[in-house]
Image (cartoon, rainbow, N blue to C red):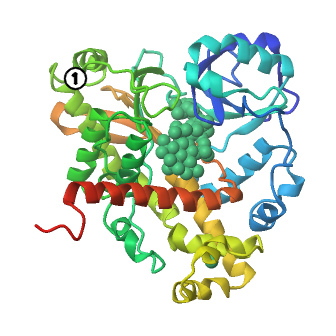
Amino acid sequence: MGMEGIVLEEEDAKDWVYRGEGAVNIVLGYIGSSPVFVGKVLRIQKVPRFKEQYTVGTSDFSVHEKILWKDSIDLDTCSSREDAEHLYVQNVMIPLLGSEHVDAGVRVSVSRGFLEAIEKDNLCERPCWRVDAARVNILCDSALLISDHIVFPDGTCKEVPCISVEIKPKWGFLPCSRFLAEGNAPKRSISRFQMHQALKLQRGETSGVSEYDPLDLFSGSIERINRALKSLFTTPQNNFRVFLNGNLIFGGLGGGTDDTTFKSNEAFEDKIGDVIQAESGQRVTEFLNLVSETIFQSGVLNHLLEAQKRDFLDIEGAIHAYYNVISQPCRVCQDLSDTELSQRYSSLHSLSLDESIDIVKGFLTAATAKDCSMMISFRPREEGDQVSSYSTVLLDSTNQLFDYKAYFIDLDMKPLKKMQYYYELDQKILRCYNGLEKAVHGSPDSQE
Ligand SMILES: O=P(O)(O)O[C@@H]1[C@@H](OP(=O)(O)O)[C@H](OP(=O)(O)O)[C@H](O)[C@H](OP(=O)(O)O)[C@H]1OP(=O)(O)O
Ligand SMILES: Nc1ncnc2c1ncn2[C@@H]1O[C@H](COP(=O)(O)OP(=O)(O)OP(=O)(O)O)[C@@H](O)[C@H]1O
Ligand SMILES: [Zn+2]
């Protein structure tokens, strides 16, 4: 469907309603009647408030970034950041995740009046802390039109309910790089997500530790997938949300870690009564079974795991390749006084530019896959429904058959300059986790 010639103007803003947002984008659902937009969401870029100037265009891509991605995207010919992001999804992420699970969307032109109206009209819907942090970037001239993953477009005439989950799975594997320092051994046995919880707790970014462990969700075992879902339900943080007919009924809006709007189990049980035909008190369990079964059967996370594994050296290895790529002295090796230690990384520093580029590209691609979310939507099929174009899943215990679809969202390119930050964050997480271990198990030299 061509979007040429279409420009969203100020008066169109009333047809778009707040859906949610992350740190970088705000997402609106469509309630108007234009066939071009029905069943779509609009994803609009934001700009941090503390940043003095709005920016547009691709000036924020560095020379090295342009070289890094040159085989997949010609960043020089991109007219805007949306343009570049769109090509990144199209050329880098879709080949990894499969086009049946990703909609790259199309760009649509927006006027400044439209963006200003969107900013003004949605202020009260947005979480305060998100409003304080960023606003709509009114200098953008386009936004992305993406299919709305929480509705089924070929709406039957009957009112069929639709229930959707949004899961931010995070890192599904343990690193096994030979470049991990000895002191960092916990990384080989404890998930990054669980270790990060300790730091988040210490920094007050969460008030409680999540029970969720991504290794369960990615395990391929139905029991462990189910355990992961139960943990997500108990401690959702920003990793789990549920929508009923497009409305949030469980989890926090706006993506924060700790603004979970707690809804009692009973209220949730009542709300999903139309979709899950189980007795009250059993519906949550059955719903989580349905999601587990779907993840298990569809194998949709296998692709994501493969994409995440493009990081095969871990940041402790990739950081050295990064300094090769930007042709600067390695800050990590510089700080190592011990020559023996820095010898360890000399093999990385003698790699060719192309080899270094491949390592860093793999790392950043994996970073996208470690931070994206997955949306799975379900609608019950009824006796007499025609053959469905969707996959189906059977909920054994209630003998209900559901259409479902699974999509990945938020597949943004991670900036190259974040590499040093990734290295530092990793060190902080380890220091904090090791400190905690000591506190719990006693220091190594304390007598038992
Ligand atoms: O570093 P992490 O694992 O904490 O991930 C960040 C996310 O934090 P969380 O999932 O809550 O732990 C963080 O999410 P929140 O803003 O905390 O919801 C962002 O997704 C961030 O990506 P970006 O800077 O917007 O490109 C994420 O940064 P990246 O590491 O993916 O670049
Ligand atoms: N295609 C879609 N269909 C339905 N809902 C969507 C879609 N895309 C995004 N959303 C909703 O909007 C929210 C914000 O979108 P998104 O995660 O893309 O924002 P972001 O700013 O890029 O996030 P982050 O801070 O993680 O980078 C999502 O959490 C989801 O609830
Ligand atoms: Zn180095």
Q: Who's the residue at 40% across and 69% down the image?
A: 184
The percent position of residue 222, horizontal first and vertical second, equals: 24, 52
Badge 1 crowding class, 10 Å Cα cut-off, few under 14, some 14 to 19, many 20 or more, is some
Name the residue furthest front.
446
Say above or below: 311 vs 136.
Answer: below
Q: Is residue 261 left or right of residue 78?
A: left
Quadrant of the picture in which ligand 3 is shown: bottom right
Residue 338 in view = yes
Task: Name the image quarter holding the C terminus.
Answer: bottom left
Find disc 1 in the rendering and name its residue.
277
Say above or below: 277 vs 424.
Answer: above
Q: Is residue 248 left or right of residue 232?
A: right
Name the residue furthest left.
448
Q: Is residue 257 left or right of residue 14?
A: left
Q: Who's the residue at 40% across and 19% down the image?
A: 160
Q: Who's the residue at 81% across and 49% down the image?
A: 60
Q: Is residue 298 left or right of residue 133?
A: left
On the image, which quarter does residue 54 sit in?
A: top right
